[in-house]
Amino acid sequence: MGYETILVARDGGVARLTLNRPDKLNSLTARMHEEMLTALEDLSKDGETRALVVTGAGRAFCAGQDLGEDCVRPAPGKTLDFRSLLKERYNPVILRLRALSIPVVAAVNGVAAGAGVSLALAADIALAARSARFVLAFAKIGLVPDSGATYFLPRLVGRARARGLALLGDSLSAEEAQAWGLIWKCVDDDALMDEARALAQTLARGPTRAYGLIREALDRAESNGLAAQLELEAELQQRAGTTGDYAEGVAAFAEKRAPRFSGR
Ligand code: T3D
């Protein structure tokens, strides 16, 4: 599929997906959702990519839904079908991203608003340029935070801050986002892509199957009780412990050298 609204590049074990509608602050359209889904589907099957970076072209990461799209423009006598829009476009992208078995790094290069914030929060590790900001814009236009924002926010920053951000829609700087635990790290603007690439390359050289299991453990811990989580850890450890990467990790430790993980 030739892409119009995203760019996908691969470098060794790292793929980079760039939202590419800079003149519209990379706001999300039906076409963009379709292309993101296809790209994520392809990545999940290619067997070589071991880490993914998601970023935006130009001065924004993503401004959320494109408010110029007909499907979200109120008009007399027209009933807007947000339910279907979310179920058919937004939710599958977030779920597909979370279902990848490789780590996902968001490189938030500029403003993230609305579902653009949700997209960044769906990554495993979010880095942001110092000039970036996070705007829970939904309530500003009379909508409810979506695309996982109500799921991720309170888990990351706690109840009080989640409610303040969601209700007021105030802008949060990248430095505040780091201090609040919304993101992993805020870095100088001109260092962002180098840091994101280096981080993704480190992850791509890591024990990919263990990473997938770690992500599963952390995701399921959101709803499990302690006993269930201990059971799950035992199951996942059984799987991790029978990978080639575990054998390599232990051998490397014994031989006092760096491990050479194959991702298998
Ligand atoms: O089912 C559903 O559809 C519901 C799903 C909803 C998911 C959502 O994401 S809802 C939230 C939608 N997004 C927003 O409400 C954010 C709207 N944008 C803004 O609040 C601001 O633009 C930003 C905070 C993102 C950036 O502010 P600033 O001052 O840096 O830039 P600007 O001047 O406002 O915008 C620059 C241009 O981008 C401007 O176009 P122009 O005047 O130069 O031709 C602006 O209209 C355009 N733009 C910004 N955001 C969007 C957009 N165009 C379309 N859709 C946008 N979301």
Image (cartoon, rainbow, N blue to C red):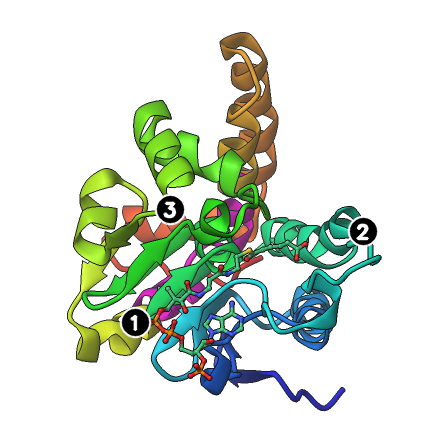
For numbered disc 3, what is the local secondary structure?
A: loop
Disc 3: which residue: 169
Residue 50 lies, in percent from the top left, at: 52, 65
Task: Say whether disc 2 or disc 3 marks the residue closer to the N-terminus.
Answer: 2
Q: Name the residue rendered at 79%, 52% in the picture.
A: 81
Label 1 crowding class (10 Å Cα cut-off): few <14, some 14-19, many 20+? few
Q: Residue furthest top?
A: 227
Q: Position of residue 172 (x, y in %)?
A: 26, 51
Up-down relation of residue 157 to residue 143 (above or below):
above
The secondary element bearing badge 2 is classed as helix
Say what amino acid the circle numbered 3 marks.
Answer: Gly
Magenta-colored stretch includes residue 203 = yes
How many residues crowd mark 3 within 10 Å: few (<14), some (14–19), many (20+)?
A: many
Q: Amino acid at mark 2?
A: Ser
User: As drawn, is 30 to the left or to the right of 149?
Assistant: right
Residue matched to label 2:
84
Which residue appears at 41% of the width and 30% of the height? Answer: 154
The nearer-to-camera label among 2 and 3 is: 3
Q: Range of the magenta residues?
A: 198-213
Q: Which amino acid type corresponds to the residue marked 1 in the rendered image?
A: Ala
Label 1 sits on a secondary structure element that is helix
Question: Between marks 2 and 1, how big is the CA–CA gap?
Answer: 39 Å
Depth check, front residue: 47 or 68: 68
Tag 2 near tag 1, CB within 8 Å: no
